Image: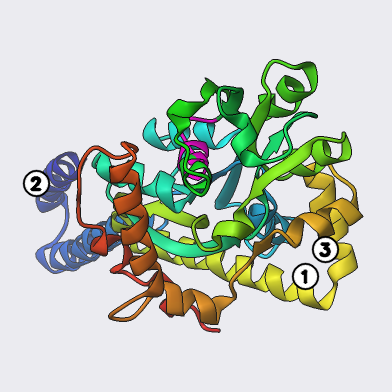
Amino acid sequence: MLLYHNKMYKNLDKYQALIVPEGRLNCRNKIAGIFRLAFLCVLFLILLWGCTRDTQPLRVGTNVWPGYEPLYLARELKYFDNNILLVEYSSASDVIRGFRYNAIDAAALTMDEALLLIKDGYDITVVLVMDISSGGDVILGRNGLNKLSDIKGKRVGVEKTALGSYFFAIALGTVGLKPSDTIPVNMEVDKHETALKTGMVDAVVTFEPVRIKLIAAGVNVLFDSSQVYGAIVDVLVVRNDYLRKNPNNVNTLNALLQGGFKSLDYMHSEPQNAYKIMAEREGISKDEFVTALKGLHIPDIKENRTMLCGIKPTLLLTTNQMKKFMIANDLLQKDFNVNSIFDKCQINALNR
């Protein structure tokens, strides 16, 4: 296009030289030069505007779990704009698949699930500790199974590609058993309620809100995460290449984090309305949701900074212990360094 314009102006100059006096020609040449310069400036500004405005939407994947509800509450209260897209999956396995297939840029996962992604070469950063399970993850058994050791030789529904395998191995270790001492049946969490109620399995390794529904149906709690507090930590991870693509993408992530903490403030100032909104999304009553929240701890920004930032973030120690356990129980096949996933400490950029 620029070559065309230059050619056009050259032809115009020749034509003007035939019919326009020299003084007026010089004047017109100056005006033409000004117009050409203005055209180039406008073109540059358009290109610059196009580059800076090309902020990629932040697609955040989660499954259904009370600890992830503050993000959805923030969306409901319009604490962040439409550039942040929350994508709800039916299971943790689906979230992991979505991340592997590049359908999402960030994912709410348990720390052991994040380790599996790192092992497979995914370049990610942990940007938020969303919650610590303290009873929300459970092993439930049918009538006749009264203690954890009773599931030896029994069929156990467990989501093998996600948290289930890790929690199952930890729990069984407390009574001297291994997963191989049972008959694991691989099934995703949205199948757990029906499978236990219909007798397809004798027990399930599950979590909220399935936990509260099955307990209401009369099943037995054989083990819960309060007995191994700190072993199950839910985190938000983001692809580093998303953050590198555009500086505005970092601002979008910060807006998500700010919105999440703002919704925690709302939960403290307006608990009844907050619980009502979140319970409806979870498909349980408000009282059931309040009970479910008692099974987890949601860290505030101060605690998040302690867990994720500094020379020795506390979650790093927990993560290394988790990694060793997973290797010893064949949940990971090799050792690797996890320090880099705590390097950015994105949460320190927030004005809170």
The circle on residue 204 is none
Residue 275 image-quadrant placement: bottom right
Task: Give x and y (percent) for residue 216.
Answer: 88, 40
Quadrant assignment for the N terminus: top left
Residue type pointed to by label 3: Ala
Quote the CA–CA distance across marks 2 and 3.
75 Å
Q: Which residue is mark 2?
A: 14
Label 2 sits on what residue type? Answer: Lys
Q: Residue at x 82, y 57 (%)?
A: 291
Q: Earlier in the sequence, mark 3 or mark 1?
A: 1
Q: Secondary structure at mark 3?
A: helix
Q: Earlier in the sequence, mark 1 or mark 2?
A: 2
In the rendered view, does 106 fall on the left or right side of 48?
right
Predominant secondary structure in magenta? helix
**Residue 166 on the magenta segment:** yes
Magenta stretch contains residue 151: no
Mark 3–mark 1 Cα distance, whole angstroms, equals: 5 Å
Q: Where is mark 1, residue-wise?
A: 267
Q: Nearer the viewer, residue 213 or 267?
A: 213
Please name the residue shown 34% across and 68% down the image: 317
Q: Quadrant of residue 337?
A: bottom left
* Residue placed most toward the observer, 80 or 174: 174
Quadrant containing the C terminus in the rendered view: bottom right
Assign a secondary structure to mark 1: helix
Q: Which residue is mark 3?
A: 274
**Along the horizontal axis of the image, is 261 left or right of 122?**
right
Q: Are marks 1 and 2 in contact (CB under 8 Å)?
A: no
Q: Residue at x 63, y 67 (%)?
A: 298
- Depicted 156 relative to depicted 339: above or below: above
Q: Which residues are magenta?
A: 159-168
Label 1 to label 2: alpha-carbon separation: 75 Å
Query: Looking at the picture, how far across and down is residue 194, in whole percent?
Result: 76, 22
